Amino acid sequence: MTSADGPFPAKGAFPYKLVATDLDGTLLRSDESISPRTREALAAVTAAGAAHIVVTGRAVPWTRHILDDLGYQGLAVCGQGAQVYDAGEHRLLTSVTLDRQLAALALAKIEAEVGPLLLAASRDGLDGEVLVAPGYRRLEGSLPVVPLRDAADLWSAPLNKVYVQHPTLSDDELAAVTLRVAGGLVGVTMAGAGIVELLPLGLSKATGLSLAARRLGVKAAETIAFGDMPNDIAMFAWAAHGVAMSNAHDELKSVADEVTASNEEDGIAVVLERLLAGAS
């Protein structure tokens, strides 16, 4: 097997047993594709005995097509840690839902502070719909959504998360206000440009990753993690080694063990190839 920079071994004493990768801004390029070089590096890592696990803020319905394209058969952590999904069996193993009463109270507190919010929400389940209210800026490409015409429908079925946007506040400003006024009711994270989320209190990517790792018989000390946004901070704290992409949010870079090239420049492959070369 070869990389763009030359040959590297398909087998060897790779120093980690688990490679955890975020999707958007990390494993995926801006067109939602995965480069051949990164695919090769991940294949070499798994041939060397490590497991690759996707850890994403996307819920299962917005992740499944990417996993299928990868030929991915393992576990995936979706919905900011709320869901552990068996891609090989197309089965949801665990799922944590948002307390809708607490979420409604949190929204009321935030709006009392900053005025009306623009809303979307992710319903629970393998086929959970993403609801989008008028004015909410569509995100993550052309993935399907359901228009939310009646605000009452937001609470009509179990949810994994609620997305919030503000007409004038920046993402950082909105996340800070939300955490200050509602952080005792819900979890708050920023997962990307225009993506501030309300989650079940205490939930993070580390929650789901630790559950999945336990199923795989792998420890935090045996894990390397890649990410690009503040929602990856908990995952970096859990893993032995955290690698931020060069396009990452400054808050994540400040806690990363190293910074690699961007998602457009095969940043994951750069690190994995180096580790594989060191193992040969």
Image (tube, grey):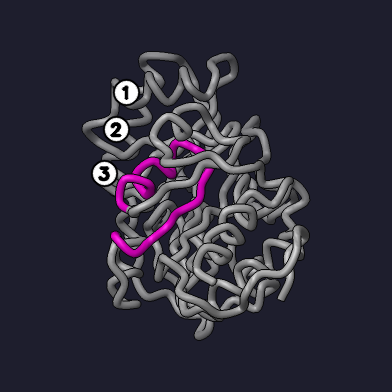
Q: Quadrant of residue 218?
A: bottom left
The alpha-carbon separation of the residues under discs 2 and 3 comes to 13 Å
Q: Residues within 10 Å of mark 2 (few under 14, many from 20)?
A: some
Q: Are marks 2 and 3 in contact (CB under 8 Å)?
A: no
**Image location of residue 148, percent across then percent down:** 59, 44
Q: Which residue is mark 3?
A: 201
Q: Nearer the viewer, residue 153 or 33?
A: 33
> Does 139 appear above or below 81?
above
- Is residue 103 shown in magenta? no
Q: Answer left or right for 213 relative to 43.
A: left
**Image location of residue 81, percent across then percent down:** 38, 56
Q: Answer left or right for 180 relative to 66.
A: left
The alpha-carbon separation of the residues under discs 1 and 2 comes to 6 Å
Q: Nearer the viewer, residue 122 or 139?
A: 139
> Of marks 2 and 3, which one's residue comes earlier in the chain?
2
Q: Residue at x 60, y 33 (%)?
A: 193
Q: Amino acid at mark 2?
A: Leu
Q: Which residue is mark 2?
A: 105
Q: Which residue is mark 1?
A: 109
Q: Amino acid at mark 1?
A: Lys
- Is residue 233 shown in magenta? yes
Name the mark nearer the viewer: 2 or 3: 3
Q: Residues within 10 Å of mark 3 (few under 14, many from 20)?
A: some
> Of marks 1 and 3, which one's residue comes earlier in the chain?
1
Q: Are marks 1 and 2 in contact (CB under 8 Å)?
A: yes
Please state the extent of the stretch shown in magenta in the rendering: 221-238
Q: Quadrant of residue 3?
A: bottom right
Q: Residue at x 73, y 46 (%)?
A: 264
